Image (cartoon, coloured by chain):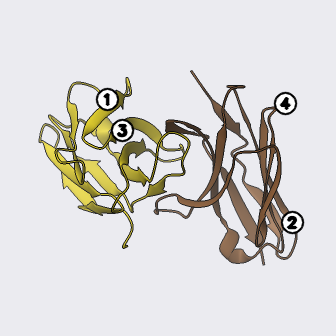
Amino acid sequence: QKEVEQNSGPLSVPEGAIASLNCTYSDRGSQSFFWYRQYSGKSPELIMFIYSNGDKEDGRFTAQLNKASQYVSLLIRDSQPSDSATYLCAVNDDKIIFGKGTRLHILP
Amino acid sequence: DTGVSQDPRHKITKRGQNVTFRCDPISEHNRLYWYRQTLGQGPEFLTYFQNEAQLEKSRLLSDRFSAERPKGSFSTLEIQRTEQGDSAMYLCASSPGLAGYEQYFGPGTRLTVT
């Protein structure tokens, strides 16, 4: 059974600081990795995807992938109160296998 | 393109009743997925379709659950003889291509079984 592990949090970060979210995955053969943001009562929203080792940047978001360590992370720069949400790490295995999510709270 | 849509958004039903949910994917997306999410958990895979073919079903999908995508466009998920444990958010997602492509979610249908 393939698994994705995340710290459930909550992770509290001051406004304007960098939020760092991490996850690990069990299947060394996994190829595609995603970060979804989910506000309370809403559906997941895709914010980043990464397929290759290294960093991928999109605006204030940077996804990092280390396949040797089976580790994926998401950095959010200049954190805003609107970034307060649950962040779901996911691995694509035809269907998506999600972690339980990390709750992020940006402190004004 | 209006994104993935789901209907209804909310459903309250009594234990033992049957319910049916509908999902309309993004046009030209040939893959359609169903997930279930309960409070404090990530979404859990239920089943998916490539066009009209149902390619995989999770062991979470008991024989009370059935899904169809008859013309390769919209899909329905039916739950027969609902139980209180079926209360959850049912999410539909679509994807433009084969394995590995990103998936886009609809707003979900929240089911409450009383």
Q: Does B101 sit left or right of B114 as displayed?
A: right
Q: Quadrant of the N terminus of chain A?
A: top right
* Number of numbered discs on residues: 4
Q: Crowding at label 2, few (<14), some or many (≥20) Cα neighbours within 10 Å?
A: some
Q: Residue at x 21, y 34 (%)?
A: B66
For label 2, the residue is A18
Mark 1 vs 3: CB contact within 8 A: no
Q: Please name which of the two marks, 2 or 4, marks the residue nearer to the observer.
A: 4
Q: Residue B37 at x, y = what percent?
A: 44, 45
Q: Are dots 1 and 4 on a single chain?
A: no
Mark 4 vs 3: CB contact within 8 A: no
Amino acid at pointer 3: Tyr
Amino acid at pointer 4: Ala
Q: Crowding at label 3, few (<14), some or many (≥20) Cα neighbours within 10 Å?
A: many
| Spatial separation of the CA atoms under disc 1 and disc 4 | 34 Å
For label 4, the residue is A68
Q: Earlier in the sequence, mark 1 or mark 3?
A: 3
Q: Residue B8 at x, y = what percent?
A: 23, 61
Q: Residue at x 54, y 44 (%)?
A: B42
